[in-house]
Amino acid sequence: MIQASNVTLRLGKRALFEDVNIKFTEGNCYGLIGANGAGKSTFLKILAGQLEPSKGEIIMTPGQRLSFLEQDHFKYDAYTVLDTVILGNKRLYEIMKEKDAIYAKEDFTDEDGIRASELEGEFAQMNGWEAESDAATLLNGLGVDTEYHYMMMSDIKDTLKVKVLLAQALFGNPDVLLLDEPTNHLDLDAINWLNEFLINFDNTVIVVSHDRYFLNKVCTQIADIDYSKIHLYAGNYDFWYESSQLMIRQMKEANKKKEEKIKELQEFIQRFSANASKSKQATSRKRALEKIQLDDIRPSSRVYPYIDFRPNRAIGNEVLEVKNLSKTIDGVKVLDNISFVAGREDKIAFVGANTQATTTLFKILTEELEPDEGSFKWGVTTERSYFPKDNTEEFKGEETIVDHLMPFSPVDDQQYVRGFLGRMLFKGEDGVKKVCVLSGGERVRVMLSKMMILGSNVLIMDEPTNHLDMESITALNNAMIKFPGVELFSALDHQFIQTTANRIMEITPDGRLIDKVSTYDDYLANDEMARKRTVTTVNVEEDTED
């Protein structure tokens, strides 16, 4: 159990949290949600003891261990991958190293023997003999293959470091587990594995995530940060959303009835206050009027951008034909003889662990890369907009946001461009910000503004939900659902894919294409059934050989 008691955090004159009282109990997974800047990550740091509140305290059950997902990818560069995971239980790691140092001594003394015996007892009590196998199981589950386990952290890619640090947080069955955006940069297989791990985790979990499907899958309660307070709701994210909307509707309806009653009382008082025979009744109604209090309905601090992709022209029947595309990068064949035809009603999601292949395909289709073999042809009515996964080059200049977008505008008028920026929550002087100083989320909103301005009938989007808050993801999701053109996109948000795509493509690790006209859930279900059939076949063959 961990709880916040009268916690206040002030940043200058502003109170980020004020007199927060909340208890997180064992056996529950809490989704910590709130608008950008509400203080979700900050509150996790307060719970973890990395940040001191201005007032109040954090209380945790004595003897319990807390684990917090590290965000510093370079902190453990001097350690092996396996040791980094075991460092999730620092005391266990210290015991292991002290034991090794004692046994390595040439002049082993009686005192060393006594100390080693004490350490062995504590080591066994902490299930130390299973530490390496437990760490390896976590790593394998997250997609970090055994070949990397004894490599130095400094020698592996950042995409693997993310998984290693997550395995570290999960290691050793912590009593309280704090996870800040654990699904960021994870492939969908790793996210699905994490879903199952947390569903079966018996202790306390508090997680910040922008992945609605993930929150729906793992959370038993939602902790909503709004106006410096935190309110608990039983159930998952969708249940919170419905409950919060219902509560607002009920309060509005209650206020409407109260307002009608107030009007009725006021009319009676006005008509009969001067009438002697009705004066007592009028006085009684005055007292009743004074007792009626309208509920204070504060609108949420959440702000949703307005995203609406409107094509300048309708798309024809011929959209895209891809023939035998192949591409090798750094000696690895990422695309191997890929062919497909996209139709005018297709919304194609590219899924699977081979995200490099998807990015490569998108770059070829937008003529940023040349294929080694094969060809592709866009229909004459198509007009394309491209959202790249890496937008660094686009935002290196010193120009303002408005000046950056003006070349894409069909109207030579800054106010026209500012209208699109306003929809994407760039207010007032935000338009004169230099693009080189924008945050990741601001860059994405500028790129979406650009795509709205262009008015294309084909959208090619490579992981557009990265860096967006929940409100922006929801707005983008809704915009893509109602977009009347063709979409080719990738995303790590399950709900985003499920609600948008009507066709699923997966490029396998060896570069081949799997193409299914299907929803994402149906695709996964069929894929799971295929894997089970494969396992059954293998087992039958093994039994036959025996």
Image (spheres, rainbow, N blue to C red):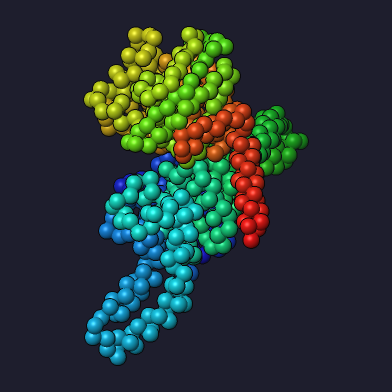
User: What residue appears at the point 67 percent right and 42 percent down from the top-left corner?
Assistant: 288
User: What residue appears at the point 33 percent right and 59 percent down from the top-left corner?
Assistant: 80
Among all residues in the image, which is located at the extreme right?
A: 277
Among all residues in the image, which is located at the extreme front?
A: 545
User: What residue appears at the point 53 percent right and 50 percent down from the top-left corner?
Assistant: 193
User: What residue appears at the point 51 percent right and 24 percent down from the top-left corner?
Assistant: 339
Among all residues in the image, which is located at the extreme bottom?
A: 110
Q: Where on the picture, by quarter, is residue 330?
A: top left
In the picture, measured across the screen, residue 46 lies left or right of residue 535, that is left
Against 275, residue 313 (above or below) is above
Q: Nearer the viewer, residue 13 or 431?
A: 431
Q: Nearer the viewer, residue 139 or 247?
A: 139
Residue 518, percent from left and from top: 62, 31
Residue 401, percent from left and from top: 31, 23
- The C terminus lies in quadrant: bottom right
Q: Is residue 490 visible?
A: yes
Q: Nearer the viewer, residue 329 or 527?
A: 329
Q: Is residue 243 visible?
A: no
Residue 420, percent from left and from top: 42, 20
Against 76, residue 111 (above or below) is below
In the picture, measured across the screen, residue 161 lies left or right of residue 457, that is left
Residue 489, percent from left and from top: 49, 28
Q: Where on the picture, by quarter, is residue 214?
A: top right
